[in-house]
Image (tube, helix red, strand yellow):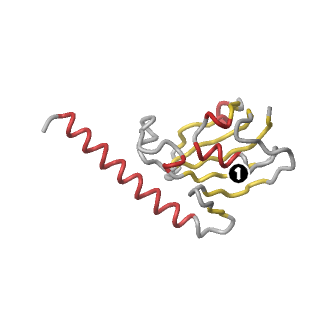
Amino acid sequence: MGIADLLFQRNQQKAAENLKAGQQFLAENAKKEGVVSLESGLQYQVLQAGEGVRPGPTDQVSCHYHGTMIDGTVFDSSVERGQPASFPLNRVIKGWTEGLQLMAVGSKFRFFIPPHLAYGERAVSAVIGANSTLIFDVELLGVN
């Protein structure tokens, strides 16, 4: 067995571990007060309700976010950079496209995103491996 085969096996094992850990996390999380579970698998918690407009699936939005793994490791944060992010909702992961449409401007939600609504079986960084469950605190600042 060559190095490529060993790396492939190791990556497959890590992806399976990530999937199992995420499933266990989401099953426990669903029992917590205030956590809403949608049919898609997306879970969310309203941290602050806003009163503004809600974006549609192709709208451009501006938001602040803080992304972590289920173990608390931060992988990205517009809050830490001090600059909001702006993007069309149809150009982000499915969990964001679905979740942000539930929010009104001024809202702050916490999203718990299973792998099939995030990056799936792709590892996208050294931190976000294949089959990772992601957590985002998102504040919707505007719909452009």
Q: Is residue 72 left or right of residue 110?
A: left
- Mark 1 residue element: strand
Count residues near mark 1 (Cα–Cα under 10 Å), then give few for <14, some for 14-19, many for 20+.
Answer: many
Nearer to the camera, 100 or 109: 100
Name the residue rendered at 18%, 34% in the picture: 3
Quadrant of residue 74 within the rendered picture: top right
Circle count: 1
Q: Quadrant of residue 87?
A: top right
Q: Quadrant of the N terminus?
A: top left
Tell me where residue 110 appears, x and y as whole percent.
66, 52
Residue 38 location in percent, x, y? 62, 60
Q: Is residue 34 above or below residue 133?
A: below
Q: Residue at x 78, y 53 (%)?
A: 48
Task: Quickly name the residue at label 1.
Answer: 109
Residue 126 appears at what percent x and percent y?
42, 36
The residue at 53%/44% (across/down) is 118
**Corner quadrant of residue 140:** top right
- Rendered location of residue 69, percent (x, y): 51, 48
Amino acid at dot 1:
Phe
